[in-house]
Image (spheres, helix red, strand yellow):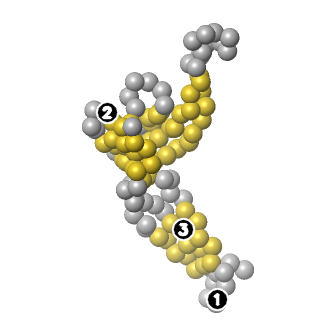
Amino acid sequence: MICNIIVNKGWYDETDKRSECNGGGPTVEYSTAKLKIEITWDNNHTSLCEIDTFYDTDNGLELDDEDYEEYHVALVKDILTNNFIEIGLGDENPILVKLADTGEVIYKQ
């Protein structure tokens, strides 16, 4: 029987502890938060974002077209504006990406 469930709700380490029984027993811990990153764009604007998903896409042309291109895209959600941003397509690309909680640089142009 699991006696303790610890749910890490988010970025600021807000923890919700629920006790399922009075005695000892194993503890299960899991996170419901998405990874937060800080993105600096080429116009020096900075966005705080959550990583949503990664996927492959293309430019919509046929495979045998000489201008056909495939892309790896990261879909992130800007926390302040609640807008989704596709990184990997278009003209706006980040110049710096850091983990929000540690400041570790994971991408630098």
Q: Residue furthest right?
A: 1
Residue closer to the observer: 108 or 51: 108
Q: How many residues crowd around disc 1 within 10 Å: few (fewer than 14), some, or many (20 or more)? A: few
> What residue lies at 40% left-to-right and 51% top-to-bottom?
105
Element at badge 2?
loop
Residue 62 location, quadrant: top right
Q: Which residue is mark 1?
A: 24
Residue 8 appears in the figure: yes
Residue closer to the observer: 63 or 9: 63
> What residue lies at 27% left-to-right and 37% top-to-bottom?
44
Disc with the residue nearer the chain's start (3 vs 1)? 3
Q: Is residue 19 above or below residue 14?
A: below
Element at badge 3?
strand
Dot 1 amino acid type = Gly
Q: How many marks?
A: 3
Q: Residue furthest front?
A: 109
**Which of label 3 and label 2 is nearer to you?**
2
Q: How many residues crowd around disc 3 within 10 Å: few (fewer than 14), some, or many (20 or more)? A: some
Q: Quadrant of the C terminus?
A: top left
Disc with the residue nearer the chain's start (3 vs 2)? 3
Disc sitting over residue 7 in the figure = 3
Q: Which residue is mark 2?
A: 42
> What residue lies at 52% left-to-right and 38% top-to-bottom?
74
Q: Return the x and y of residue 48 as percentages of the image width and height.
A: 36, 47
Disc sitting over residue 81 in the figure = none
Q: How many residues crowd around disc 2 within 10 Å: few (fewer than 14), some, or many (20 or more)? A: some
Q: Is residue 34 above or below residue 69?
A: below
Dot 2 amino acid type = Asp
**Which of label 1 and label 2 is nearer to you?**
2
Element at badge 1?
loop
